[in-house]
Image (cartoon, helix red, strand yellow):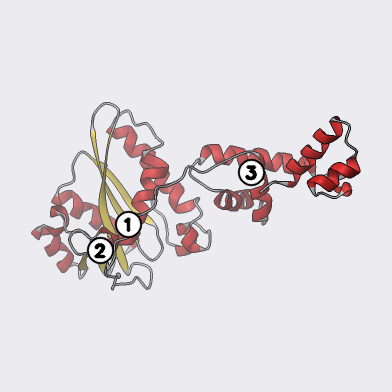
Amino acid sequence: MVRPDQKRAAVRMMQAHNVSQRRACQEIGVSRSSMVYKPRQPFKDEVLAESVKALSEKYPRFGYRRIGVMLGWEMNETINAKRIYRLWTMLNLQLPKKRPRRRRPGSDPIKLQSGHINHVWSYDFVSDRAANGQKLKILVVVDEYTRECLALEVAASIRTHHLIDTLSRLMTLYGRPKFIRSDNGPEFTAKAVIQWLTDNDIGPAFIKPGSPWQNAYVESFNGKFRDECLNREWFYNRKEAAVIIEKWRNHYNHERPHSSLDKQPPAKVSGRKYVA
């Protein structure tokens, strides 16, 4: 689709070759009045365009809608998405395309749906490596209802006692979940973990083996975490990784607009007291 500014540029080019403006406008299909149109607020658009560009450079995985929401928060006003899109295309900004997700036919729906805060948590592991070669094993804990990331625990390895200690700390900070969803990894099915969950009246909700889509909330979060943090940042060692990852977790909970929460960050929706 040819934009209006491109059509006007074509008219001017024809005029440069001794074609009258009237005829050029007829050929291109634009009104003559549009050739003398002056934007009402060019300065405001220029300032807004700079802000759009700055945020897109800071968050290269965000599209124009999410950038527009964040700018609206900064400026304390609602900014029309079409206006942001116009500036987005003018700046020639593009979002790298994601690979399409593979959908498996006949997959079972998630039967246990979270209905309130602390109803269902889910946890999983994500692996990476620091620049000095140190392995990073990251325990991810998410509240499925609020979409909050309750923990991104970074370690070389996470054994049973470490997992239990982390869950105990999170319960002290945020309260006790009714259920906790996970795959059938050895850390989650360990007898000590099952016993601890039973003692604390928490129901383990295991997904079917080889069915990660049944743990959809944490899998979705893992994709964002890798896309927006792990793939963008450079960690010299495990200690630096823990600091940067925790900073990103705070950004995710408090600043990042979430599409499933009416473009609000998880912490604002939940009202949960946040503890760093």
Q: Is residue 226 above or below residue 177?
A: above
Report the front residue among 52 and 200: 52
Indicate which disc, 2 or 3, sits on the residue closer to the N terminus. Answer: 3
Q: Residue 235: in sight, yes or no?
A: yes
Within-10-Å neighbours for mark 3: few <14, some 14–19, many 20+? few
Residue wearing tag 3: 89
Mark 1 is on which residue type? Val
Indicate which disc, 2 or 1, sits on the residue closer to the N terminus. Answer: 2
Residue wearing tag 2: 181
Q: CA distance from mark 2 to mark 3?
A: 42 Å
Quarter of the figure with residue 54 = top right
Residue wearing tag 1: 218
Q: Is residue 215 above or below residue 94?
A: below
Tell me residue 265's x, y (percent).
Answer: 49, 56
* Residue found 32% across the figure and 64% down from its top: 175
* Residue found 14% across the figure and 51% down from its top: 160
Report the front residue among 28 and 142: 28
Mark 2 is on which residue type? Arg
